[in-house]
Image (spheres, grey):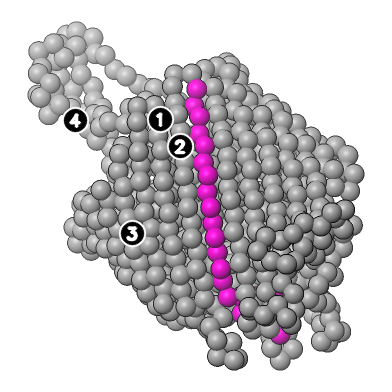
């Protein structure tokens, strides 16, 4: 850094370090700060204007962005750590990346994380399965502002979020088992969606329209008042869909309504946060669940509520309480219950989390307990109810159901030294399902910054997952479930290196997963048309993976040019040691992305005109049975998405194209994905 030195006989006052980072205090002030070296004599005689002119030094934009990202607190441990302190691999999609991406939903945004597998049966989040590092959609924890919103009925509905992408501040992806942090569902990772918490009065609206009768619109209002803040948002999205049934009817149409409210109160001693959300979705399911029926339909609705608090000071008590309710109606023949009765499910999840941590000279120590109750009433999932319940709006009844509770206690310590971080802990878990006794799941993470730019890290973590209600009891429509399935368990080792300097950020990691009793649905195709899908425990499953990423901030590397702002490339490779026999077909555990490559570039074409281009290459292991009965491998495909944006002070206009080159590909069985999808959009900020 260039410094201007003034001659003086008096001693020079020089600030060298603030906390562990030379920028940490400056970032926390939320104002523009200049850094320089001034002698005491200069400070005596210089006016504010001349001093500023002589020593104003600003960090390059790329470097500023890196520093700001390092200071973000992420949920990789029980006690909050910044991204720079974390000894785990956490991918963060920040607000800037979200705004630039050619994506219309949270599900679409996650496609750009190399370690995440997003498999869609319907576009724009109509029906999406999300997994991490070769796992299944059931094996991750999904959180909203740190609150677990997993759906115990089935992971297929876990991605029904109540928030629009305009509500999101950032998305954190924690890769690898996180049992000691999130308990019984984070077998291979966790995804935390953090909503925006604006501090100024304001509002914004947005509208989009495009191919296949696609229309979307929504808005946000922020109403702060002294220590109390309230935010409201809503959005509506619909499309005619891109395919038709053999009878000629639209069968991939959808419409989605989202409502979200969050509030917060803060004073010197307490922070209080609460939210309430609603998601209502109707979508044509063409051949989603069976290739024999091309006019299936599904309706889902969800309610999300939570209250969180945190005391301030040396001791932080962080209690939270939440309740989520889900409704699901599946129609094998759309709108016609005379042929096959509809499947109805209602799920209620109630939880209390009593987390706490204390800060002391040797770091942060966290301890606490969590109780979570999961209850379902259904027409086909569970054991017979003593008293059937009437299904609202119908003459049907919920005749079966199941209730189970999970109790856990955790202890964790985070040792934070100058260049060294050690996080170690254990969780004790007991579930009432299947009379499961207490089981211990430990974990330890360590990182060492051995030079100014390099950091190495290593970890060992364990976790478990309880079977979903669908895996235990869904025995209709060509499926045969096993209610005696064992919980899945995972052990994982990981090591890697991170690099951070002006204008460049990179990482490389290697990991090994060892899974026991992994749950899957398999089918023996030798049985012909009579073959059924069976839920089973695979005895073991080993996976070896490599991930690498590199981000270049060209405004720092090449400050003379303003055309190329940023370029990133990330790659994920996974190899599992358990392959299927040619006649066996797997729905989940043995279908995974062997290779995934993501490249993105941000270009500034004119002062207000920018272009974002994304490229993805994916090669999936596994196979599926086509409509003729032939078994076909998934193979590989490449996709290009682009977004052209005109940004002014209060408004933005944009044009997006997904699947620019109109590729034909399948993410799931016999469900072809849409071709080229174009849309125009605009948003305005008040």
**Quarter location, residue 390:** bottom right
The structure residue drawn at horizontal position 21% and vertical position 58%, both measured from the top left corner, is 608
Q: Which residue is mark 1?
A: 228
Q: Earlier in the sequence, mark 4 or mark 3?
A: 4
Q: Earlier in the sequence, mark 2 or mark 4?
A: 4
Decide if residue 606 is on the left or right side of residue 381.
left
How many dots with numbers?
Answer: 4
Q: Are marks 2 and 1 in contact (CB under 8 Å)?
A: yes
Residue 511: image location, x then y, percent: 67, 51
The structure residue drawn at horizontal position 54% and vertical position 22%, both measured from the top left corner, is 311
Eye-nearest disc, 2 or 4: 2
Pick whichever, 649 or 596, lies toward us: 649
The magenta stretch is 270-292
Calculate the distance from the C-alpha at mark 3 to the C-alpha at mark 2.
Answer: 22 Å
Calculate the distance from the C-alpha at mark 2 to the C-alpha at mark 4.
Answer: 39 Å
- The residue carrying pointer 4 sits among few (fewer than 14), some (14 to 19) or many (20 or more) residues within 10 Å by Cα, namely some
Pick whichever, 540 or 465, lies toward us: 465
Q: Secondary structure at mark 1?
A: strand
Residue 587: image location, x then y, percent: 73, 70
Eye-nearest disc, 1 or 3: 1
Q: Secondary structure at mark 2?
A: strand
Q: Which residue is mark 4?
A: 56
Q: Which residue is mark 3?
A: 206
Q: Is residue 285 magenta?
A: yes
Calculate the distance from the C-alpha at mark 4 to the C-alpha at mark 1.
Answer: 37 Å
Residue 285: image location, x then y, percent: 61, 75
Q: Earlier in the sequence, mark 1 or mark 3?
A: 3
Q: Predominant secondary structure in magenta?
A: strand
Q: Are marks 4 and 3 in contact (CB under 8 Å)?
A: no
> What mark, if any, has residue 263 been given in the picture?
2
């Amino acid at each position: 850094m260039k410094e201007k030195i003034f001659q003086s006989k008096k001693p020079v006052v020089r600030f060298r370090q603030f906390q562990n980072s030379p920028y940490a205090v400056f970032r926390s002030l939320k104002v523009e700060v200049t850094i320089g070296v001034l002698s005491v004599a200069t400070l005596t005689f210089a006016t504010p204007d001349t001093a500023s002119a002589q020593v104003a030094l600003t960090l390059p934009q790329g470097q500023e962005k890196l520093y700001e990202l390092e200071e973000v607190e992420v949920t990789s441990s029980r006690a909050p750590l910044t991204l720079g302190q974390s000894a785990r691999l956490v991918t963060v999609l920040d607000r800037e990346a979200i705004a630039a991406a050619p994506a219309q939903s949270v599900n679409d945004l996650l496609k750009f994380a190399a370690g995440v597998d997003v498999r869609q049966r319907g576009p724009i989040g109509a029906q999406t399965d999300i997994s991490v590092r070769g796992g299944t959609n059931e094996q991750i924890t999904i959180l909203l502002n740190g609150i677990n919103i997993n759906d115990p009925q089935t992971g297929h509905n876990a991605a029904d979020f109540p928030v629009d992408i305009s509500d999101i501040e950032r998305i954190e992806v924690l890769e690898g088992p996180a049992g000691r942090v999130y308990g019984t569902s984070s077998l291979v990772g966790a995804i935390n969606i953090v909503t925006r918490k604006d501090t100024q009065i304001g509002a914004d609206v947005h509208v989009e329209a495009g191919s296949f009768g696609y229309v979307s619109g929504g808005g946000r209002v922020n109403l702060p008042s002294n220590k109390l803040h309230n935010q409201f948002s809503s959005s509506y999205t619909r499309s005619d869909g891109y395919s038709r049934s053999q009878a000629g009817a639209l069968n991939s149409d959808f419409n989605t309504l989202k409502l979200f409210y969050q509030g917060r109160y803060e004073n010197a001693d307490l922070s209080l946060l609460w939210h309430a959300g609603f998601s209502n979705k109707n979508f044509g399911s063409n051949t989603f669940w069976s290739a024999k029926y091309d006019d299936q339909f599904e309706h889902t609705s969800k309610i999300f509520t939570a209250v969180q608090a945190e005391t301030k000071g040396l001791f932080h008590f962080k209690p939270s309480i939440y309740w989520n309710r889900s409704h699901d109606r599946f129609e094998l023949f759309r709108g016609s219950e005379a042929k096959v009765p509809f499947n109805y499910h209602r799920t209620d999840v109630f939880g209390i989390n009593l987390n706490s941590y204390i800060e002391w000279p040797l770091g942060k120590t966290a301890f606490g307990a969590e109780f979570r109750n999961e209850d379902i009433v259904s027409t086909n999932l569970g054991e017979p109810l003593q008293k059937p319940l009437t299904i609202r709006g119908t003459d049907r009844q919920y005749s079966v159901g199941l209730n189970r509770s999970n109790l856990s206690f955790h202890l964790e310590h985070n040792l934070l030294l100058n260049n060294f971080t050690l996080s170690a802990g254990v969780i004790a878990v007991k579930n009432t399902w299947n009379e499961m006794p207490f089981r211990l799941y430990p974990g330890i993470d360590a990182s060492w910054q051995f030079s100014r730019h390099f950091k190495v890290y290593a970890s060992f973590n364990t976790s478990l997952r309880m079977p979903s209600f669908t895996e235990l009891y869904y025995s209709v429509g060509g499926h045969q479930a096993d209610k005696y399935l064992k919980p899945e368990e995972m052990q994982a080792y990981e090591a890697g290196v991170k690099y951070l300097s002006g204008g460049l950020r990179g990482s490389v990691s290697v990991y090994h997963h060892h899974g026991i009793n992994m749950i899957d649905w398999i089918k023996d195709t030798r049985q012909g048309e009579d073959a059924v899908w069976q839920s089973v425990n695979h005895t073991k499953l080993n996976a070896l993976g490599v991930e690498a990423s590199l981000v270049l901030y060209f405004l720092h590397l090449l400050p003379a040019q303003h055309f190329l702002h940023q370029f990133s490339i990330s790659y994920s490779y996974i190899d599992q040691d358990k392959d299927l026999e040619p006649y066996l077909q797997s729905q989940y555990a043995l279908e995974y992305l062997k290779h995934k490559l993501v490249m993105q570039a941000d270009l500034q074409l004119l002062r207000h005109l920018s272009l974002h281009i994304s490229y993805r290459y994916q090669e999936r292991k596994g196979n599926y049975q086509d409509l003729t009965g032939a078994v076909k491998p998934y193979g590989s495909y490449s996709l290009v998405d682009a977004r052209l944006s005109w940004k002014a002070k209060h408004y933005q206009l944009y044009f997006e194209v997904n699947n620019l080159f109109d590729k034909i590909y399948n993410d799931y069985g016999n469900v072809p994905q849409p071709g080229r999808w174009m849309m125009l959009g605009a948003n305005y900020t008040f």
